[in-house]
Image (cartoon, rainbow, N blue to C red):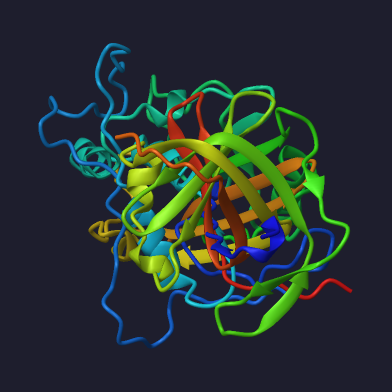
Amino acid sequence: MRRTQLRNRYIAALLSISIILGITACGRGTPAGQEDPGQQTTGSGDTQEPVITVQPGSNEGSREPDVPGEAFDPGQEMTPLDYNSYYQFMLQRASEGNCIFSPESMNIAFDMYGYLLEPEDQKTIKDYLGNRPYMDYSSTDVFKITNRLWINSNKEFHLPENSKLDGGIAYYIDMSDPKSTDEKNRYVSEQTNGFITSTPTEFTPLVVFDAMNILYFKDTWKDGDKWLDGDTTSFTNEDGTVSAVYMMHDGADSYLQSANAHGYTMQYENGFRFMVILPDEGTALSDVDVNAFIHGDVDTVINECYLAMPEFETESTYELGLQDLGLPVTQLAKSVYDHDTDPPKITQVAKIRVDHEGTEAAAVTEIMVEDNAMIAVEEPYYMTCDRPFIYVIQDTQNDDAAFIGVVRELKTIN
């Protein structure tokens, strides 16, 4: 049977790049090169579903977590992250269409935010994040990490002394100037090479500060361009409709397998990995243990495997509050600001494009504060992502998941 005739599911998981104290939505995905209609879902709609909060790290069994300002011991074992928490949170917030989210961007932004709080609140943030040194994460040639603390020059705001926020991260700007938001968006566009041109946040006279993290990734496949079909293949969308798409192909001598899904990894030229996870027939996207795949707690099957996966492009926006992340609603500490403030607003914009040449992905997270075992298989395995699937981009430099996403539907190629 031809490879393109065999069906396998396609799971896509993306991690975003910027924190502004808010999470919003998932956009409808399109094949690469086509315009995304930009469907979104906000996190504030009336819903009867149980609320899922993100709880990335746990310090159980480890020493007392570091607090901002304390040096991280390179020999200390880092807290393993629970990526299922991020994944389920993303699925709940973006219940329709394709979506991408960046856990790494969000956690870096929260680590930055923690340096502005008093010791008790710092510990709350560190208990939430675990003991990973996010502010020490390093960039590579293909993965750029940018942190900026936008500070309203009209506010009585004082940076903590001798903190990691010194050294060029802090940037003072008159946020009463209508052009200040444009300057922020130009900066985002510059840092993402024009891939993300703006974020939904606006600078106003009420804003005290905006803690922003930006991630930008772009790399080619290690073994060159993937072979792209000349003819279209049917992709069954989550709602049962069928779209005609082009598939790209790859092959390897092994694949991953859990109780209800199969996985396949592809290497980028500079060390990062792309993982696609296809749920078995009849398995819902929400029933897949993404955490097991990311941490390698699944079986590696030594056998030929042939992958067929569509090109795609997706952008998502999220807006949320501290309560959505399972954190207590706190105000900005008096140690850095002498007036009352509203709880922070968190925002993330994430975007990805995957095609036969490679991948480009970016995320911007903002936190804004305002006043008031081996299995023997004889036959080759064909993994055809012609139905909804999950994907992950693994940051091998910092041992983290840069992006997690899902592809539920695609538009027919014109």
Residue 155 in view = no
Residue 361 in view = yes
Tell me what residue is drawn at x 54 percent, y 69 percent. 25
Residue placed most toward the observer, 231 or 327: 231
Q: Residue furthest left?
A: 61
Residue placed most toward the observer, 23 or 333: 23
Where is the N terminus found, in terms of image quarters? bottom right
Q: Is residue 357 above or below residue 43?
A: above
Tell me what residue is drawn at x 77 percent, y 41 percent. 226
Q: Give the image quarter of residue 162.
A: top left
Q: Is residue 325 above or below residue 93?
A: above
Q: Give the image quarter of residue 86.
A: bottom left
Q: Residue furthest front?
A: 378
* Residue 116 position within the rendered picture, expressed as x and y whole percent measured from the top left: 37, 38
* Residue 276 position within the rendered picture, expressed as x and y whole percent measured from the top left: 54, 50
* Residue 22 position within the rendered picture, expressed as x and y whole percent measured from the top left: 47, 62
* Residue 270 position within the rendered picture, expressed as x and y whole percent measured from the top left: 66, 23
Where is the C terminus found, in terms of image quarters? bottom right
Q: Is residue 136 above or below residue 191?
A: above
Residue placed most toward the observer, 128 or 84: 84
Q: In the image, 306: left or right of 293?
A: right
Q: In the image, 197: left or right of 93?
A: right
Give the total of numbered labels. 0
Tell me what residue is drawn at x 68 percent, y 42 percent. 250
